[in-house]
Amino acid sequence: MRIASIDIFRALTMVLMIWVNDFWTLTDIPKWLQHANASEDYMGFSDIIFPLFLFIVGLSIPYAIENRLAKKESKSLIAKHILIRSLSLLLIGVFMVNYENAHHESILIGKYFWGLLMAFAILLIWMNWKKSPIQKKWHIYFQVLGFIILVFLAVIYNGGSKGESWMKTHWWGILGLIGWAYLINGLVYLYSKRNITTMVILWGIFNVLSILNQTDKLIFENDIITLFSTLYTGTIPAFTTAGIVATLVFKKLSGTNIKWCYISLIGLGVLHIVFGMVTRTYWGISKIQGTPSWLAICTGIGFLIFTMLYYITDVKKQTSWAKIIAPAGTATLTCYMIPYLIYPIYVITNIKFPDILNSSIIGLFMSFVFSLLVVIFTGWLEQKKYKLKL
């Protein structure tokens, strides 16, 4: 069973993620659109996008796992898939974060060519070659070449302000954080026999951990333990658990009492937003600090948007407006990776656009056009059977 609203929600979020990720190329854009600084009690539009994607990951997990169970896959095989997928996201995330922290002058081939090769290697390794028009005999060679490139990039890497350090986990990157959230939530959902009570308890645990993270009770100095900080600080995986709970509430009530389904999801959304606003006095709203108030408000927005999109697209069948962005919902990783090919080329070739195209309202419009073009190109690649798959 495929829910149109989830694919469209994912597509909308990815389009907006590419858009806000392009803001670094612009000048003179409104503060309310940008990420808040670490010290600010504030949430810009950009601070909402990633939490929504984590929420969507949770929305999708029950359907993905149940589809595999329906195909008679064993739990151990599904768990293996979850583990490999998560580790892949962590690996890609580490390389992407280190690209951000690379020291251009200290790297043999320079930072931007390093980044271009990184993106190319990811395409070689995680392209779904089986469904591509490329002959089967070449598939393994492409993937091996991709891993060789990643090893080469790791060997020549230098980072830090003076090129004094090698690759580090830093903050895992967007994809790495998704990997951690997917790993814990996917495994718990799988082995809890898809029990809503278990997922609600897990959701509560992550929210408590998010609150404790605002104290000094979760500070560890052991490097091994801190590798798991994404999990024990609670906030990131809580978004995904909330998405799973939303799907389970929807599945439980939509078939029997759709009215109560709407009331429940909207109620959860409103309660979370109210809780976030009320507790702002205690913790502040901060994405970088991962405060419980930020968690609550973004979670509430996730519940409300999912409910609205379900009514529009699955009940009223109004989906034609989303056709142009559909590839961002079905070939999401491909869509996310394309800018990582474009930006290094942009810098290496020293392409310059008139300042008017990179500033203020016109700049924002051109940046959004760029986001749509990335999605359209993703759709073209998908039609040609070139699509990344973890």
Image (cartoon, grey):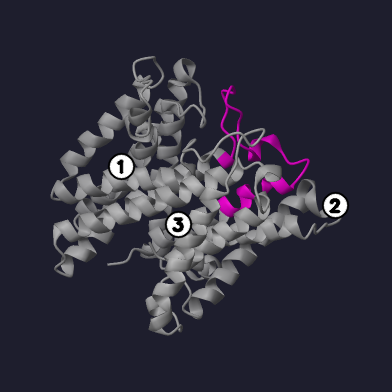
Side of 72 where 135 appears, left or right? right
Q: Identify residue type, mark 3.
A: Arg
Q: Which quadrant, please, contains the N terminus?
A: bottom left
Residue 260 shows in the view = no
Q: Give the magenta part as a residue range.
A: 17-46
Label 2: which residue? 356
Q: Identify residue type, mark 2.
A: Ile
Label 3: which residue? 10
Q: Is residue 134 above or below residue 222?
A: below
Give the Cα distance between marks 2 and 3: 31 Å
Label 1: which residue? 241
Query: What residue sits 56% from the left and 23% below the top?
Result: 41
Binning the other alpha carbons within 10 Å of mark 1 as few (below 14), some (14 to 19) or many (20 upward) gives many
Q: Identify residue type, mark 1.
A: Thr
Binning the other alpha carbons within 10 Å of mark 3 as few (below 14), some (14 to 19) or many (20 upward) gives many
Q: Element under label 3?
A: helix
Give the Cα distance between marks 1 and 3: 16 Å
Q: Earlier in the sequence, mark 1 or mark 2?
A: 1
The x, y position of residue 329, in whole percent, is: 46, 63
The x, y position of residue 176, in whole percent, is: 43, 45
- Considering the whole magenta stretch, tell me its main secondary structure: loop
Circle number at residue 307: none
